[in-house]
Amino acid sequence: PLTYNSCDAQSGITAKACDPSVSSSSKVIVQEDGAYFVIVAPQLAAVDETGSSIIADYWVAVNGIGVANSNVRFESDAGGVDVIISQGVYLLNAGDEVEVLASGENAVTKVISPGGTEPLVPSVIFTMYKLGTGEPYIQLSSTIDQVPDAFATGGSALTFQSIDAQSGVQFLPAKASEVVVETSGTYFIIIAPQLQGDGSAGNNMAADFWVTVNGLDVANSNVRYMASSSHADVIACQGVYILNAGDVVEVYSSGEHAIVKAIDEAGEPFVPSVIFSLHMI
């Protein structure tokens, strides 16, 4: 498990970095029952920059058990440096212990000292907060590979096959790309696609991901990833949205030589091809 030695902000949740009486520096302890949003951002680099490629997985465990569909993967050549994310909504009870576990090859969760007046780059940033009582939320993931439509075609909607947490937001498997808001308000949305190249020799992969509401593209919601087709990465597209009851939210993608990739690694939680989180703020 990853460990923490700095308590940067705290209320209603505790950890050894905040309270020395906590038994382990890897455990974050919930103090109240409720729905919580968790986002983990590990900083990746190679153990040996002249060696083999980097590969690393990161997932969440609650009370020592890996959480389904919380796993994400990074894969790069040995010179690669990146920060990735794993995020989700979790229904937790007082006393539950939340940890982040990792596995990999030639990978280190790396502290970086940029020098000058820049702040230190932590090896991992862990954020967790309780959602308001009764506030709507949904957590979805995809268990299948998805191939984006070509660039300049308008893209294709991503679909979801797993409801991992849900309250006050509608999702029907028969309309597997559509998330329907039931209560008007302000919402935070974050989407994390897991990308991999299609294996075509000599080609870089590239992919865009953006949000639509009621079939209309949302301005400034688009993100792009481009890398060697031998790499794998999880990226983020996030935003705050003012939505009305009945609004339909979808995620669209386009690209070339890219696959939104699901990965089944033995002994670990499943790596979904995309994780979708939405909650009222």
Image (spheres, rainbow, N blue to C red):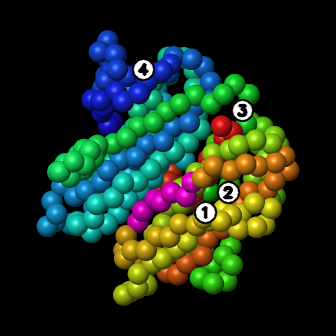
Residue at screen point 59% across, 82% down: 151
Q: Nearer the viewer, mark 4 or mark 1?
A: 1
Circle 3 Cα neighbour tier, 10 Å, few/some/many (<14 / 14–19 / ≥20): some
Residue 81, image quadrant: bottom left
Task: Examine the structure image and report whether residue 212 is included in the region drawn in magenta.
Answer: no
**Position of 104 compared to 180: left or right?**
left
Residue at screen point 24% across, 44% down: 120
Circle 4 Cα neighbour tier, 10 Å, few/some/many (<14 / 14–19 / ≥20): some
Q: Are marks 2 and 3 in contact (CB under 8 Å)?
A: no
Q: What mark, if any, has residue 160 been given in the picture?
A: 2
Residue at screen point 53% across, 66% down: 223
168 is higher (above) or lower (below) than 18: below
Pointer 1 residue: 221
Residue 229 x, y percent position in the rendering: 40, 77
Tell me which label, 4 or 1, sits earlier in the chain. 4
In the rendered structure, which segment of residues is drawn in magenta? 232-238
Looking at this view, name the residue that lies furthest to the bottom: 202
Residue 71 x, y percent position in the rendering: 47, 49
Q: Nearer the viewer, mark 2 or mark 3?
A: 3
| Amino acid on which disc 1 is placed | Ser
| Amino acid on which disc 3 is placed | Glu
Q: Is residue 172 visible?
A: no
Residue at screen point 45% across, 29% down: 98
